[in-house]
């Protein structure tokens, strides 16, 4: 029977590997979409063929990853609809925004977009984004700046165009007060179209990450492009493509003529200052100090923006890793669960056969003495075989539990969080489940539950699951006997939170491990059978409820875990919070 199970498992693994090898990214050709007029990133050249930084980068990724691509360029609005409808597998260039993450998944960024305000040379009323309020603004339909204006100034008078070229052409012809177009694209279009009346405002209004985007959930295609992008960066080919198309944005070396010009501009005012009055000197010093303060503030703002961008990039990379990990875990859990289910089904039958045959074998033993079963003595097997079957069944149940946790980690939780739950009731239900386990090991649980608590919106079964896991973790950390676990609840009125605290007298956690306690598959109890998913799942459940899990521990003196959940206002409607 065990041989049959192994053969079935090997067949399933071989079939899965073959499918992955043939399927690649899931289809023979990946359809890549983009804007037909967004130079230098992507555009249709004079021969009617796709060209630009994005196009060359996509082809390079396809070559190193070994799959074929079909590049389709068209109006941006149509390309976004094509991605949503499944006619396009991936867009090769989309600016990142938090709102767009509800519709698409982003790759690691491959460029930065510097969004600028374009104005007419003879109209200098607009100098910053605040000056745009109440004006007539030209933006491309469904572009990132269209999305921005809907949130920045919902009452703005917008002129929507199909392309960025049309937006700049209308501005050049006298329509609107300004246009919102990325700086580099605007410079290309201005030169190509011969637009003499328009210029960008000096400072960009924002900097945005720019990269590939797939329809929400299409993790397989996105992972292939992320991997190809990483390979190109390591090999240096990405930098070559970047320099070819976007090198115009790199800082240019300062020429001697420019140095002389700047020296002249600085020296002449200095000579005038030396020959001027003390009042002029003091005025100039005041202006220099004021400008220095403004520059320092601008540098600080840019550094903060870059740090925020790096944080967003790290979040995108982590999200992509977790999506890939979830897909892998779900497949592995399924493949393990099937043969393990067969083991759990057959073990009771083996025990039944053993109990039924034992009287016959004992009778034979009484007549003929001890004899061999296979290579083993019957007397020895009679003592050890029941223990072996019991241990095997326990191991199979442990596998089943680990697989259940793997599936719980991998699945997207669809539980509705609409129940108005009482945290005290959840704590009492969890205590009933684990109390026997703790008392059996000569320990005790002390509960201090608040008399009254505000309600919490969520799912009571999921919160009970978190509390049970925290109590079991605390019990497993206790050593010896006579130790205690304390569980308490309270309402933090200043922060409007409901808190549940589990404190144990166990061995504690090393400081370097505290930050990793909720990482998937991280555990300090590997030798005791832990698989490192309990706290990761618990943290995910608490996060879905809008709360947090906080850990405090000192080695040798125990651990304290605090769950914080947002309290509902007295009316029970979370929309009125803080009013």
Image (spheres, rainbow, N blue to C red):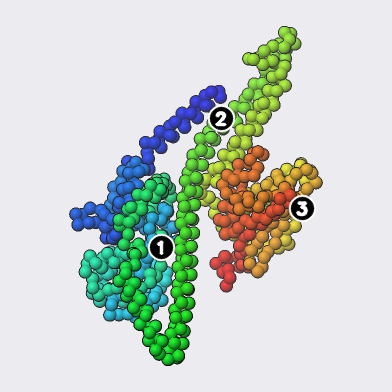
Q: Position of residue 501 (x, y in %)?
A: 69, 56
Alpha-carbon span between mark 1 and mark 2: 53 Å
Query: 142 and 212: which one is in front?
Result: 212
Snapshot quadrant of residue 254: bottom left
Q: Kindly check if marks 1 and 2 are in contact, taking CB atoms under 8 A apart as contact.
A: no
Mark in the foreground, 3 or 1: 1
Q: Position of residue 345 (x, y in %)?
A: 59, 29
**Residue drawn at (34%, 79%) of the image:** 265
Left or right position of 354 against 442 = left
Task: Identify the residue position indicated by label 1 in the image.
Answer: 208
Q: Position of residue 371 (x, y in %)?
A: 69, 11
Return the disc, 3 or 2, that comes first in the chain's sequence: 2
Quadrant for the C terminus, please. Answer: bottom right
Please indicate, yes or no, whether residue 178 appears anywhere in the rendered image.
Answer: no
Give SS at disc 3: strand
Task: Identify the residue position indicated by label 3 in the image.
Answer: 446
Query: Mark 1 packing: few (<14 Cα in 10 Å), some, or many (20+)?
Result: many
Q: Residue 418, relative to residue 61: is it above or below? A: below
Q: Residue 185, relative to residue 50: is it above or below? A: below
Query: 569 and 151: which one is in front?
Result: 151
Mark in the foreground, 3 or 2: 3
Task: Identify the residue position indicated by label 2 in the image.
Answer: 342
Give SS at disc 2: helix
């Amino acid at each position: 029977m065990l041989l049959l199970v192994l053969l079935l498992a090997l067949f399933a693994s071989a079939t899965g590997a073959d499918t992955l090898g043939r399927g690649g990214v899931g289809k023979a050709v990946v359809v890549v979409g983009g804007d037909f007029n967004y130079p230098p990133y992507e555009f249709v050249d004079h021969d009617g063929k796709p060209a630009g930084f994005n196009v060359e980068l996509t082809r390079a990724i396809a070559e190193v990853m070994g799959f074929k691509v079909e590049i389709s360029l068209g109006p941006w609005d149509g390309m976004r609809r094509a991605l949503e409808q499944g006619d396009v597998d991936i867009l090769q260039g989309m600016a990142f925004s938090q709102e767009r993450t509800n519709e698409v998944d982003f790759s690691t960024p491959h460029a930065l977009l510097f969004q600028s305000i374009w104005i007419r040379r003879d109209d200098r009323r607009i100098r910053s984004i605040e000056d745009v309020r109440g004006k007539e603004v030209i933006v491309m339909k469904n572009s990132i700046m269209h999305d921005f204006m809907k949130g920045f100034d919902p009452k703005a008078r917008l002129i929507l165009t199909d392309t960025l070229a049309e937006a700049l052409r209308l501005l050049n012809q006298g329509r609107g007060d300004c246009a919102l177009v990325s700086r580099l694209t605007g410079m290309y279009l201005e030169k190509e179209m011969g637009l003499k009346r328009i210029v960008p405002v000096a400072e960009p209004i924002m900097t945005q990450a720019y990269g590939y985007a797939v329809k929400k959930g299409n993790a397989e295609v996105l992972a292939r492009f992320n991997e190809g992008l990483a390979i190109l960066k390591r090999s240096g080919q990405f930098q070559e493509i970047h320099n070819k198309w976007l090198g115009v944005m790199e800082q240019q070396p300062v020429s001697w003529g420019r140095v002389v010009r700047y020296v002249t501009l600085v020296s002449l005012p200095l000579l005038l200052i030396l020959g001027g009055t003390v009042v002029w000197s003091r005025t100039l010093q005041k202006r220099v100090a004021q400008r220095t303060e403004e520059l320092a503030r601008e540098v600080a703002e840019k550094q903060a923006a870059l740090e925020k961008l790096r944080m967003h990039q790290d979040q995108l990379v982590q999200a992509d890793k977790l999506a890939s990990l979830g897909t892998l875990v779900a497949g592995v859990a399924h493949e393990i669960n099937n043969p393990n289910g067969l083991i759990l089904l057959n073990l009771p039958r083996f025990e039944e056969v053993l109990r039924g045959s034992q009287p016959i074998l004992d009778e034979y033993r009484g007549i003929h003495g001890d004899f061999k079963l296979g290579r083993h003595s019957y007397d020895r097997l009679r003592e050890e075989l029941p223990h072996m079957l019991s241990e095997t069944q326990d191991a199979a149940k442990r596998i089943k539990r680990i697989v259940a946790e793997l599936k719980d980690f991998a699945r997207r939780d669809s539980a509705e969080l609409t129940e108005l739950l009482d945290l005290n009731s959840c704590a009492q239900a969890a205590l009933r489940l684990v109390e026997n386990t703790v008392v059996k090991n000569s320990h005790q649980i002390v509960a201090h539950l608040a008399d009254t608590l505000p309600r919490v919106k969520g799912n009571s079964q999921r919160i009970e699951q978190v509390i049970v896991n925290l109590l079991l973790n605390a019990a497993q950390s206790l050593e010896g006997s006579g130790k205690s676990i304390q569980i308490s609840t309270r309402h933090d009125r200043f922060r409007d939170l409901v808190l549940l605290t589990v404190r144990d007298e166990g061995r504690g956690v090393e400081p370097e491990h505290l930050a990793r306690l909720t990482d998937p598959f991280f555990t300090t109890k590997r030798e005791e059978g832990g698989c490192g998913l309990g706290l990761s799942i618990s943290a995910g459940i608490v996060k879905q409820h809008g709360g947090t899990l906080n850990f405090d521990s000192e080695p040798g003196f125990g651990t304290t875990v605090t769950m914080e959940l947002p309290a509902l206002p007295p009316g029970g409607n979370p929309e009125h919070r803080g009013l």
